[in-house]
C-alpha cells in the first residue's frame, strides 16, 4: 500500500512538473547552453516577489483565503529563481573547468601522437 501511494505521488509530481512553466524554464537553465542565463533568470524573482506582496496585501484587506495560496506560490517561485542563479554559475564554472581539462588533455595527446609519428622519419634521415 505504501509503495502504491509513493508511486502515485511520484507520477503526479512528474505530471505537474511538465505543466509548470517555471519548472520548464529551470530545466532549460540547467542544460549546458542555459547555464550562462542563470543570473539573468534571477531577475524573474522580482516580479514574483512583487506579486507575492500584492497578493499578501489584498489577502490582508479582503480576507480571501485563496490569495494566501498565490502568495506561497509566488514566493516559492521567486526562491527557485534566486537559488538557480548562483547554482547555475557554479555549475558553469565546473563545466568550463572540465572542458578546459579535456581540451588540454586532447592537445597533449595530439602533440605526443605527432611527435611519435615524426621521430621515425627523423631517425631514418640521420
Image (cartoon, rainbow, N blue to C red):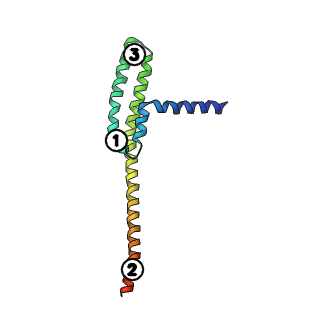
Q: Quadrant of the N terminus?
A: top right
Q: Nearer the viewer, mark 2 or mark 3?
A: 2
Q: Residue at x 38, y 55 (%)?
A: 97
Q: Position of residue 12 (x, y in %)?
A: 54, 30
Task: Give the answer, above or below, for where 87 lies relative to 70.
Answer: below
Residue with the most extreme bottom position:
126
Q: Position of residue 89 (x, y in %)?
A: 36, 45
Badge 2 marks a residue whose secondary structure is: helix
Residue, disc 2: 119
Q: Residues within 10 Å of mark 2 (few under 14, many from 20)?
A: few
Give the distance between the C-alpha atoms of the residues marked 2 and 1, in whole angstroms.
48 Å
Residue, disc 1: 37
Which circle's residue, 1 or 3, is located before the other in the chain?
A: 1
Q: Residues within 10 Å of mark 3 (few under 14, many from 20)?
A: some
Residue with the most extreme top position:
62
Residue, disc 3: 59
Q: Residue at x 33, y 28 (%)?
A: 47
Give the distance between the C-alpha atoms of the residues marked 2 and 3, in whole angstroms.
80 Å
Which residue is nearer to you in this view: 65 or 29? 29
Q: Quadrant of the C terminus?
A: bottom left
Q: Nearer the viewer, mark 1 or mark 3?
A: 1
| Disc sitting over residue 29 in the figure | none
Badge 3 marks a residue whose secondary structure is: helix
Q: Residue at x 65, y 33 (%)?
A: 3
Total labels drawn:
3
Amino acid at each position: 500500500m505504501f509503495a502504491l501511494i509513493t508511486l502515485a505521488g511520484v507520477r503526479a509530481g512528474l505530471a505537474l512538473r511538465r505543466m509548470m512553466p517555471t519548472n520548464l524554464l529551470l530545466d532549460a537553465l540547467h542544460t549546458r547552453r542555459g547555464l550562462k542565463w542563470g543570473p539573468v533568470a534571477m531577475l524573474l524573482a522580482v516580479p514574483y516577489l512583487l506579486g507575492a506582496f500584492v497578493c499578501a496585501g489584498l489577502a490582508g484587506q479582503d480576507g480571501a483565503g485563496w490569495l494566501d495560496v498565490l502568495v506561497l506560490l509566488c514566493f516559492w517561485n521567486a526562491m527557485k529563481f534566486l537559488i538557480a542563479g548562483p547554482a547555475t554559475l557554479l555549475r558553469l564554472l565546473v563545466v568550463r573547468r572540465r572542458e578546459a581539462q579535456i581540451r588540454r588533455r586532447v592537445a597533449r595527446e595530439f602533440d605526443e601522437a605527432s611527435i611519435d609519428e615524426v621521430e621515425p622519419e627523423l631517425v631514418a634521415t640521420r
